[in-house]
Amino acid sequence: MQDQIQMGGSTQGSILKNMTNLSVRVALIGYGYWGPNYARVLHELPESRLVAVCEVNAGKLQQALGRYPQIEGYTDVKEILRRKDIDAVIISTPASTHFELAQAALKTGRHVLVEKPMALTLKHAEKLCELSERTGCILMVGYTFLYNAGIRKMKECMRPRDFGRIYYLHATRTNLGPIRQDVNAVWDLAPHDISIFNYLLDQQPQWASAIGTRMLNNMREDIAFITLGYAHDVIANIHVSWADPNKVREVVAVGSRRRVIFDDLNNLERVRIFERGVSVGESVAESYGEFKLLVRDGDIISPKIEPSEPLKNQCVDFITAITMNKKPFSDCRLGYKIVQTLVAIEKSLQKQGLAVPIKVEG
């Protein structure tokens, strides 16, 4: 996709004309688990104005209206999409509803920020991308960790000169729930780590292998172990679980010169660098099959990370993409590639861990 997204369509044109002082008028669809955070951020940002909330749960809708009395409340999405004074929508609803809601919003000329994953099939993900490109509307997918200062710092720490050769990556994302009723733990939790791995490595995986189990009697995998294969023999592992009493949000990258750890739950040392590594020496081996290993031992460093809220950074990128007519960082094509990987993981789960190839997009 080009960096500059061309805007077009009569509906889209009328919406742009109605925007006042570059203040983007946003409707929030879904005020459940994550919706209140979006509402707060939109209310705080001077570049945006929260004008409406749609929530099917009457109690939660009243909570939203009580906190933001200046907005309008709805229980039917169609009522929001009939309004002419809404520039964009943010969709924070169960994953199984993402495609239908995003499609409806795009068809009415609204810019869309939809939570991950953008769709549950490749066909639907591709359809949303094509619709976004045809209507000229921004379609962004909510991958907040790509806007996390700690993950950005981690990528900095993985520059080849300092990090050496990349050996492998590992991510752990566990907790006691929340248990989803429409998708398994892979579709719920793994998209974040896939997005992080792709960002750190500047590529998407070539194959996926996964095994999982259903321990909580909810007919869906609640525990899974995933392996992704990237170019140059780099492997990446993800462990996701809804059934672990220990909440962990950790990403580890191991290279020949250093090891870098991102711990999202550690507010004091979000990123740690271990200046330690092992690599194969270039000297001639003394016997067949023997290699000289070079062990590098050094300091443990905790770099300074400027405080910022990832969700706010993501929303700023969405609003900026609209007002400046440019592509957001986590655009629809990025979301599509992650759905590709999730579909391959799902196939591997069904085949008890058999590696499933992934068509690498350009």
Image: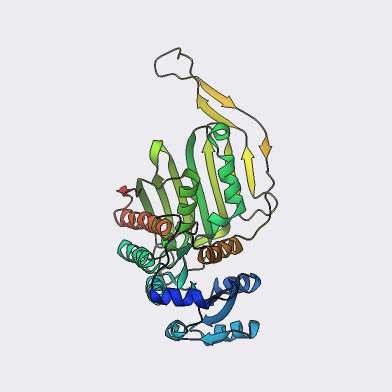
The spot of residue 346 in percent (x, y) is 34, 58
Image label count: 0
Q: Is residue 332 left or right of residue 353?
A: right
- In the image, residue 68 sits, relative to residue 346, either above or below, namely below
- In this view, the residue in front, 74 or 276, is 74
- In this view, the residue in front, 349 or 58, is 58
- In the image, residue 235 sits, relative to residue 78, either above or below, namely above
Instruction: Please say whether residue 29 is visible from this viewpoint.
Output: no
Q: Is residue 77 left or right of residue 261?
A: left
The spot of residue 266 in percent (x, y) is 65, 53
Q: Identify the residue shown where x is 57% and y is 38%.
A: 259
- In this view, the residue in front, 234 or 305, is 305
What is the quadrant of residue 12 in the picture? bottom left
What is the quadrant of residue 236 in the picture? top left
The spot of residue 245 in percent (x, y) is 56, 60
Q: Identify the residue shown where x is 63% and y is 82%.
A: 68
Instruction: Please say whether residue 314 is visible from this viewpoint.
Output: yes
- In the image, residue 32 sits, relative to residue 328, either above or below, namely below
- In this view, the residue in front, 222 or 83, is 83
